[in-house]
Image (tube, rainbow, N blue to C red):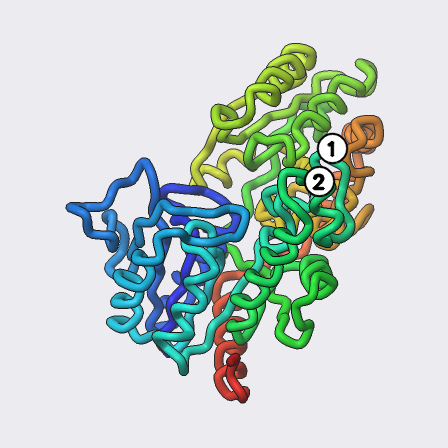
């Protein structure tokens, strides 16, 4: 098969879970030696077109191509520069002639890219993987209400208009129909969490088109347990990911300060995360104040590269995933299991689905610093807990299995008729 993987970014320039999953799938299919795969990523500022040419290689592999387009309508998930699609992208599709086109995101490219593939390659199988709720929710796809960041349990034009009074309910209804009509052109939807499937089905997408496929990771040895001094405790916590409000860092920092001194002892929290500089000023101010209040209990190490993760994991005993939104399938949970670092996670969405409370990790009440503080105290106070949870960590799927499951879906979908109209 000839397979094109499409992503809104390339992990060489943007380290995010969706970019990593898409590129991992591309590499895994290529590694089979039985299929041809291509990777197409969106490029935008500060990257510039080379001599006005929209398609670029940017020094990546021979089958890794970038399409430069920077016209983006967030409200409608739409690309205003349709000439970027009908010209360069259409020509690229005709040159590669993929039998399968697998979208891992339409950010920057627009839902019109799905329609273009259906028009240019009418016999191709189109697959869409959902990594969050961007089609459903105007609030960055987080399904969190703008007022006090309360969880949203279901979207509707009327509900969304309350959250976004600058848009009328009628306009939000038209947005929903516009996006659904384009998604209907896909033959198959994929999600790495069952929770997300349920949310999209409740929104109105057909359940029969959904398949659950867990993301895969590179097979590599786990980082060894951190060496402890005589009488030492498993008391070093790690946060890995984007530094933002939705990722729950304020909740985590407040929790750290609430653990009594007698229980905390010499424990510490290591924060490995980037993008603090692009967060709203109010968040950066609050983050700085919480860091100062936490004092010696917390250390902030900034951004990291994907290849550094095993070395950083070796420095901690536990990971904490305190997101205040539902999440889908956080990569850090898989990495935690791979390296046998028990995760402490919010009890909602894909986090609660992936981590079994008291078996291979711990849950705490989402957005509750008080409850998280209790879990942190429990983690450092029970010497046997870490050993038991770490031993039960389920191994994440390797890339060979990741590719095999997708290839089986592609083949089964190609045999299915009729194709999307």
Q: Quadrant of residue 313?
A: top right
Classed neighbour count for the residue bearing mark 1: other residues with Cα under 10 Å, few (<14), some (14–19), many (≥20): few
> Where is 405 relative to 396, above or below?
below
From the top left corner, tell me how far across and down residue 11 is, in percent.
Answer: 40, 47
Mark 2–mark 1 Cα distance, whole angstroms, equals 7 Å
The residue furthest left is: 51
Q: Quadrant of the N terminus?
A: bottom left
- Contact between marks 2 and 1 (CB within 8 A): the answer is yes
| Circle nearer the viewer, 2 or 1 | 2
Q: Nearer the viewer, residue 106 or 35?
A: 106
Left or right relative to 29: residue 334: right
Q: Nearer the viewer, residue 258 or 70?
A: 70
Query: In the picture shown, does residue 186 fall above or below 155?
Result: below
What residue sits 62% from the left and 74% below the top?
Answer: 209
Residue at the disc numbered 1? 147
* Residue at screen point 56% across, 68% down: 181
Q: Residue at x 45, y 37 (%)?
A: 308
* Foreground pick, 169 / 324: 169
**Is 403 placed above or below 250 here?**
below
* Front residue (pair 223, 205): 205
Q: What residue sits right under mark 2 in the picture?
A: 163
The reply to whether residue 339 is visible in this rendering is no
Whether residue 225 sits left or right of residue 324 in the image: it is left
Q: Residue at x 77, y 19 (%)?
A: 264
Where's residue 87, x and y in %? 26, 62
Q: Nearer the N terminus, badge 2 or badge 1? A: 1
Where disc 2 sits, the SS reads helix
Whole-percent x and y of residue 306?
45, 42
């Amino acid at each position: 098969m000839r397979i094109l993987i499409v992503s809104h970014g390339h992990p060489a320039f943007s380290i995010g879970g969706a970019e990593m999953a898409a590129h991992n799938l591309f590499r895994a299919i290529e590694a089979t030696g039985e299929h041809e795969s291509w990777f197409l990523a969106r490029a935008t500022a500060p990257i510039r077109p080379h001599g006005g040419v929209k398609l670029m290689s940017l020094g990546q592999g021979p089958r890794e191509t970038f399409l430069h387009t920077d016209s983006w309508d967030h409200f409608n998930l739409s690309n205003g520069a349709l000439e970027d699609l009908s010209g360069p992208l259409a020509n690229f599709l005709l040159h590669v002639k993929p039998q399968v086109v697998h979208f891992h995101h339409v950010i920057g490219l627009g839902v019109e890219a799905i329609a273009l593939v259906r028009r240019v390659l009418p016999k191709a199988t189109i697959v869409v993987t959902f990594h969050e709720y961007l089609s459903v929710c105007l609030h960055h796809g987080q399904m969190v209400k703008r007022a006090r960041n309360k969880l949203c349990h279901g979207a509707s034009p009327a509900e969304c208009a309350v959250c976004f009074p600058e848009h009328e309910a009628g306009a939000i209804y038209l947005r929903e129909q516009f996006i659904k009509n384009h998604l209907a052109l896909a033959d198959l939807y994929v999600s790495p969490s069952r929770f997300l499937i349920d949310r999209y089905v409740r929104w109105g997408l057909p359940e029969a088109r959904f398949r659950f496929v867990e993301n895969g990771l590179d097979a590599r040895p786990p980082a060894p347990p951190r060496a402890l001094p005589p009488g030492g405790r498993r008391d070093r916590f790690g946060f890995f990911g984007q530094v933002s409000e939705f990722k729950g860092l304020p909740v985590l920092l407040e929790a750290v300060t609430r653990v009594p001194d007698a229980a905390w002892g010499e424990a510490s929290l290591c924060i490995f995360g980037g993008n603090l500089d692009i967060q709203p000023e109010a968040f950066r101010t609050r983050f700085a104040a919480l860091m100062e209040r936490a004092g010696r209990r917390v250390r902030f190490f900034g951004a990291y590269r994907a290849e550094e993760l095993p070395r950083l994991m070796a420095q901690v005993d536990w990971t904490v995933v305190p997101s205040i939104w539902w999440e889908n399938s956080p990569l850090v949970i898989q990495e935690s299991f791979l390296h046998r670092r028990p995760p402490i996670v919010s009890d909602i969405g894909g986090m609660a689905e992936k981590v079994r409370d008291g078996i291979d990790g711990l849950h705490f009440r989402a957005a509750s610093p008080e409850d998280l503080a209790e879990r942190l105290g429990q983690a450092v106070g029970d010497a046997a807990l870490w050993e038991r949870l770490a031993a039960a960590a389920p191994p994440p799927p390797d890339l060979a299995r990741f590719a095999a499951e997708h290839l089986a879906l592609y083949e089964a979908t190609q045999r299915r008729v009729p194709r999307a109209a």
